[in-house]
Amino acid sequence: MDIRRALQSLRFVTIFSSVNRGKFVRKRHIFGAVGENVRLPFGIIPLRSENIYLHNNIEVASGAKFIPHDAIHSVFNNMHDANGRYEEHIGKIEVFDNVFIGANAIILGPCKIGPNAIVAAGAVVNKNVPEGSIVGGVPAKVIGEFEELRKKRMFKSTE
């Protein structure tokens, strides 16, 4: 980890408000893009964070991870019969408006999520999440609809 990323991560974890952490990464241009009303959990800033694009009104729960790269290239490059050089695979992660990402979900690049989508806790997203869907599981699959849950959870006044 380079010193700049280490210092940014240190500062990031000292911010106690999830909304202020979102503002911090937007102000410092740490991610590729960060929109309005983005709430991020405690944690270190992901490697290759410039490949993560977060639109507006996004909530990321504790333990969720964005991983826009893999590291298998180092294994391939160190094999005794390696004939060539292998490069790191890096993909863009884009999260559109009105998305909730549950606790301990893992988002692997390249992929797009939403808009109006929910990623369930513990899900592993390795492909695009359709608009208006709820996905869960390993690998993540559609398990419901955003609007259906929204209607179910709407507070109804007794007046």
Image: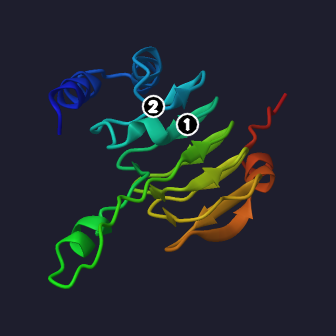
Quadrant position of the C terminus in the picture:
top right
Q: Earlier in the sequence, mark 2 or mark 1?
A: 2
Image quadrant holding the N terminus, namely top left
The amino acid type found where label 1 is placed reads: Tyr
Q: Residues within 10 Å of mark 2 (few under 14, many from 20)?
A: some
| For residue 2, above or below residue 78 | above
Residue drawn at x 30%, y 69% is 72
Label 2 sits on what residue type?
Phe
Name the residue tied to disc 1. 53
Kindly state the secondary structure of the residue where label 1 is placed: strand
C-alpha gap between disc 2 and disc 1: 6 Å
Quick check: 158 left or right of 2?
right
Please report the residue visible at 19 percent of the width from the left and 24 percent of the height from the top: 7
Q: Nearer the viewer, residue 6 or 146?
A: 6
Seen in the picture, residue 29 relative to 116 is either above or below; the reply is: above
Q: Report the coloring of the rendering.
A: rainbow
Proximity of marks 2 and 1: CB atoms separated by less than 8 Å: yes
Task: Identify the disc placed on residue 31.
Answer: 2
Q: Nearer the viewer, residue 120 or 108?
A: 108
Left or right of 149 on screen, residue 122: left
Q: What residue is rendered at 21% in x and 25% in y?
A: 4
Residue at x-position 44% and y-position 21%:
29
Q: Is residue 79 left or right of residue 102?
A: left
Q: Is residue 159 above or below residue 45?
A: above
As helix, strand or loop, the secondary structure at mark 2 comes to: loop
